[in-house]
Image: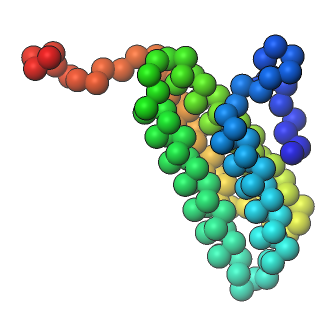
């Protein structure tokens, strides 16, 4: 797919530490990008950017939901690693978008910021679900 840092997602020399959903989404999203760029005209520029944004945000919603449902810190760390992989996907989107249209992709900056905030918040090791133990 063009990911330079793929080695950082490997373990035991041959296994990816990513979910099937994440890898399938990445492949689909990059193919979707290529298809949208083939349809590019200045008239549909906003529609292309909206399609890229909405599709990626939908997947980020899934990642955040998976993080909230994670039972322990190892599962949360696994979800965070998948989110980090999505940052690499956004870098590829930037490169391909620029190479095809000779202009930067403005929507990826907002997506990257949102994803970075999620990753930063997910790296906090502990959190309390309840502020008080009075009712427990």
> In percent of the image, x 28 and y 24: which residue is there?
129
Q: Residue furthest bottom?
A: 43
> In percent of the image, x 20 and y 22: which residue is there?
131
88 or 16, which is in the foreground?
Answer: 16
Quadrant that contains the N terminus:
top right
74 or 92, which is in the foreground?
Answer: 74
Residue 93 x, y percent position in the rendering: 78, 54
Residue 99, quarter of picture: bottom right
99 or 55, which is in the foreground?
Answer: 55
Q: Is residue 67 left or right of residue 78?
A: left
Residue 125 x, y percent position in the rendering: 46, 16
From where the camera sits, is residue 117 visible?
no
Is residue 5 shown above or below 47?
above
Residue 117 x, y percent position in the rendering: 52, 38
Residue 21, quarter of picture: top right
> In percent of the image, x 81 and y 78: which residue is there?
39
> In percent of the image, x 87 and y 16: which residue is there?
13
Q: Tell me, what colour scheme is on the image?
A: rainbow
Quadrant that contains the C terminus:
top left
Is residue 107 shown above or below 134?
below
57 or 102, which is in the foreground?
Answer: 57
Residue 134 x, y percent position in the rendering: 9, 17
Is residue 12 shown above or below 41?
above
Labels in figure, total: 0
Q: Is residue 112 left or right of residue 68?
A: right
């Amino acid at each position: 797919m063009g990911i330079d840092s793929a080695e950082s997602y490997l373990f035991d020399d041959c296994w990816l530490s990513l979910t099937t959903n994440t890898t399938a989404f990445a492949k689909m999203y990059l193919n979707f990008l290529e298809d949208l760029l083939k349809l590019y005209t200045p008239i549909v520029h906003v529609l292309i950017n909206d399609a890229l944004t909405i599709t990626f945000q939908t997947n980020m919603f899934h990642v955040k939901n998976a993080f909230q449902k994670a039972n322990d810190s190892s599962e949360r760390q696994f979800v965070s690693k998948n989110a980090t992989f999505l940052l690499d996907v956004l870098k590829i989107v930037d490169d391909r978008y620029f190479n095809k249209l000779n202009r930067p992709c403005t929507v990826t900056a907002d997506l990257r910021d949102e994803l970075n905030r999620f990753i930063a918040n997910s790296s906090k090791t502990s959190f309390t679900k309840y502020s008080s133990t009075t009712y427990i």
